[in-house]
Image: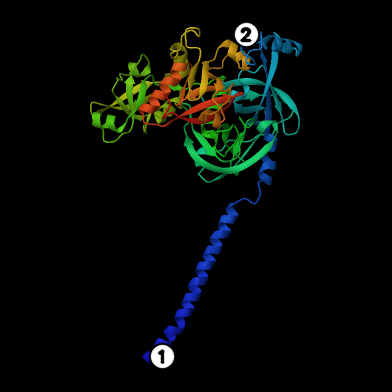
Amino acid sequence: MTSQAIAIERDQSTPLRLFWLTSLSMILIVAQSLMAHARMPESFADLAEKISPSVVNITTSTTVAGRTGPQGIVPEGSPFEDFFREFQDRGGQGDRPRRSSALGSGFVISEDGFIVTNNHVIEGADEVLIEFFSGEELPAEIVGTDPNTDIALLKVESDEPLPFVSFGDSDTARVGDWVMAMGNPLGQGFSVSAGIVSARNRALSGTYDDYIQTDAAINRGNSGGPLFNMDGEVIGVNTAILSPNGGSIGIGFSMASNVVTRVVDQLQEYGETRRGWLGVRIQDVTEDVADALGLAEAKGALVSDVPEGPAMEAGMEAGDVIISFDGKEVEDTRGLVRQVGNTAVGKSVRVVVNRNGETQTLLVTLGRREEAESAVPAAQPGPEEEAPQSMDLMGLTLSPLTSEIREQLELPESARGLAVMDVDETSEAFEKGLRAGDVITEAGQAQVLALSDLEDRIAEAKEAGRKSILLLVRRAGDPRFVALNIADDE
């Protein structure tokens, strides 16, 4: 064949190759589109039908002491005070105790009637009533609670085996996975919402937090309800929302199932939690601290104090940097606290510390955190009458919770925090939905019991260069997080 013929043949084959390459590319694009569509459920109906019988509505009743006057309605000494007192008396309120009810959600985890919900759903309740998807209602007893993770375990007695759901492995949930929430939002009952996992490993307010963030709609009444993966397994317990208006804006938080299962197992066996306790005060290792201590990287937990307890008995000292606990590297204080809390009480573990540039291994026999906390309680505020009665801060008029305020807000005696007595309507706090009657229980991920606690948290946030502070606000028992600007607050 001549060179001219070969050139002609090549010229004719070039368009053919381009055609096949283009066709192959289009086929690949279509295949990818079909695969993506196949992964996206056409409907959640089958899943909802499968798991609905195991989800329950929860109604609680609480006896609230009667009011002695028209507190919270008109100022004391107002010319309308007598009128409102007479109005209350005619309405049958007066000094009589009243019944207060609240709604929440939960789910059955065993055929013999164990039910999981949030602690704040049943906290202070005298009676707990469970409504099943079938319409049947049964009274429940409280087996145990864990305020640290906001988890509670209930039990009902039924003549028939109950439909139940199982926990899944929350650690396998990936950002972008489909999830479905079910519960009793705003008292509407057995409502389903769907979305995706928006983020993982959120730490919002507590020592043991491991929240899954989701955009599946979660509203008041959804608390305690399950968050399902597409296999119908519970990977989270819906607990709180971040919202400027009290309603869902697509930022909801579910406590990860791998945290919940440990708590539930202990509540089921002991009726209480039993967490390991090391007995040290710790802080994160910052870049400055690492440089000062000659550490290669800013990792581990710096021991700031060693009170009497397991760590002191093992020879741990202030200034040690804990770099390994029970064979696992320690990244920061949060990780260490969770590792210790998840370790069995009484277990002897090896703790590796960096002391003066050298590593040492200590053998520590863990105590029980709950016993340590009850024996050495955290600092408490002085008598209520000695503390400031109110303070204006960030557009809020705040007051520590007193017995009188608890009665006004129909809160249990166990309630702690700062009551919002008034909100400046021109403030950011008002714009973000805070109202009189709300209770601030935490600020900057730490509990606030007194006005000074909130001032301290704001000062710490400013010193750290932050422009806002995250508040945990409860309304009718339901929690939500609100971030308020502190940069210009004085």
Query: Which of marks 1 and 2 precedes in the sequence?
Result: 1
Nearer to us: label 2 or label 1: 2
* Colouring rule applied to residues: rainbow
- Disc 1 designates what residue? 5
Q: Amino acid at mark 2?
A: Gly
Badge 1: few (under 14), some or many (20 or more) residues near its Cα, within 10 Å? few
* Res 66 seen here: no
Q: Which mark is residue 110?
A: none
Closer-to-camera residue (377/459): 459
Which part of the image, by quadrant, shows the N terminus? bottom left
Left or right, 32 with respect to 79, comes to left
Figure label count: 2
CB within 8 Å, label 2 to label 1: no
Mark 2: secondary structure: loop
- Disc 2 designates what residue? 77
Residue 70: x and y in percent read: 66, 12
Badge 2: few (under 14), some or many (20 or more) residues near its Cα, within 10 Å? few
Closer-to-camera residue (422/360): 422
Residue occupying image coordinates x 38% and y 25% = 460
Q: Is residue 342 above or below residue 370?
A: below
Residue occupying image coordinates x 44% and y 86% = 9
Q: Is residue 115 above or below residue 307?
A: below
Q: Is residue 228 above or below residue 119?
A: below
Left or right, 322 with respect to 166, comes to left
Which part of the image, by quadrant, shows the C terminus? top left
Label 2 – label 1 distance at C-alpha: 111 Å
Mark 1: secondary structure: helix
